Amino acid sequence: MSGLATIVVALVAIGIVAWVGRFAMQKISGNAPKFRDMPFAVAFGYVLAAVLVALGVWYFFQPKANDQGIQNAGVIFFRWAVQGVLIGMVAAWIFRFLGRMVGTSGSRKLFRQMPLTASFGILVIVVYAVLAIFAGLIAPHGQETVFAQANVVPGGNPALGGNPDFPLGTDQIGRDILSRLIYGAQNTVGIAFATTLIAFFIGGTLGFLAATLQGWLDQVLSRAVDVLMAIPSLIFSLLLITVASAWVSGFGLTIAMVLIIAVIDSTRVFRLARAVGMNIVVMDYIEAAKLRGEGLGYLIFKEILPNATAPLLAEFGLRFCFVFLTISALSFLGVGIQPPLADWGTMVRDLSAFINYASFAPLAASVPLLAAGAIALLTVAVNFVVDWMLYRSSGLKE
């Protein structure tokens, strides 16, 4: 039986089990509303989830190597992923528990209302922040240091070509991968954070100005933003950075990248700030402030900005993710953060050859996945926190 036919038969079998199970539970429970009103799609989802969990448990306990001694990289990576998720859940629960016990009354209340996903996101962000701030103290070697030993296998076992001095091995030119991963948090995350701040300063300021003054200024800024937003941001960034590379190089190109991405992403911030500002400037307290003779600066920073904080904070988290992924993508293409600075996007590209070792050295094959995983983990963590912030700002009850 072909793979497609197997999938179809399995889905049909799951559907039959879901229908029979729902019918049986209706009879057993005396047609309770929970089962009487349950749609077939929900029952199908429950059965499908149970089947996937069972398959996952079965696959988790498969042997890591076959009879010929060839390691099963898929099983090994799956075990690492499951163990990582479980460790993350436990760490998030402990972090939330400690937050409920330690701190001010306000912070303890915040942790009591916090879901486990938000706790996990905040914990990850704190860990990344510590790595970024204290990278020089945490990293065992410098990000620019080149050693004589190149392509050292991760694991630190000399019998397998490793070195205890380099737990994650070295890259093609002899740089310590662990140190560059740590410095990547400082460079990739730090530059993305600075870029997002600049984008919010530009977009937020112009958006509030357009909402407050309106008239010809609003029309000019809005039409200019419409033109910039009509061009795909990644392609536009790549084009402008390629043009900028003709005049600057090295660290200067990194600065040019920051400014280009900040200006392009400020258009999205402008649209949000203008929309929120338009809803605020028609309020009675804005009219009262104008009648008192308050200036433009007072209106923006004392009246409009405090009432626009919640949506702007949520947008800041989302915009940071987009900027972070854009910088990583540009670095992967070779026009982002420039050497000798360590960057996760560049590391994914440079270390991709290690994936060929998956059949006999899964740890070595996981090296490029570490940088990619660091990018994905931070993106997921920030989105968890942003979702929680949006939930709180929407006025919904826990």
Image: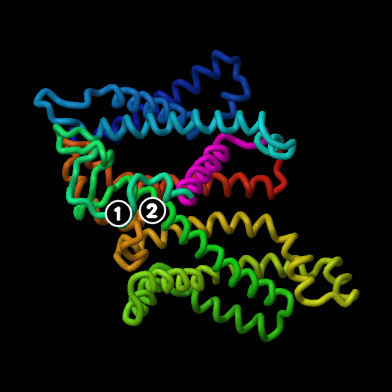
Q: Nearer the viewer, mark 2 or mark 1?
A: 2
x, y percentage for residue 77?
29, 35
Magenta-drawn stretch, dominant element (helix, strand or loop): helix
Q: How far across and how far down the image is residue 9, in percent? A: 29, 31
Q: Who is closer to the viewer here, 352 or 395? A: 352
Would you say residue 114 sits in the magenta stretch?
yes
Which image quarter is the C terminus in? top right
Label 2: which residue?
Answer: 184
34 displayed left or right of 255 = right
Mark 1 residue element: helix
- Secondary structure of the residue carrying tag 2 is helix
Residue 123 lies left or right of residue 373; in this view the side is: right
Q: Which mark is residue 347?
A: 1
Instruction: State whether residue 19 is above or below residue 212.
Output: above
Amino acid type shown at disc 2: Gly
Residue 232 seen by the camera: no
Is 32 contained in the magenta span? no
Q: Which portion, as a residue range, is magenta?
A: 112-133
Residue at 82%, 66% (x, y): give it.
Answer: 283
Instruction: Looking at this view, name the residue that lies furthest to the left.
Output: 68
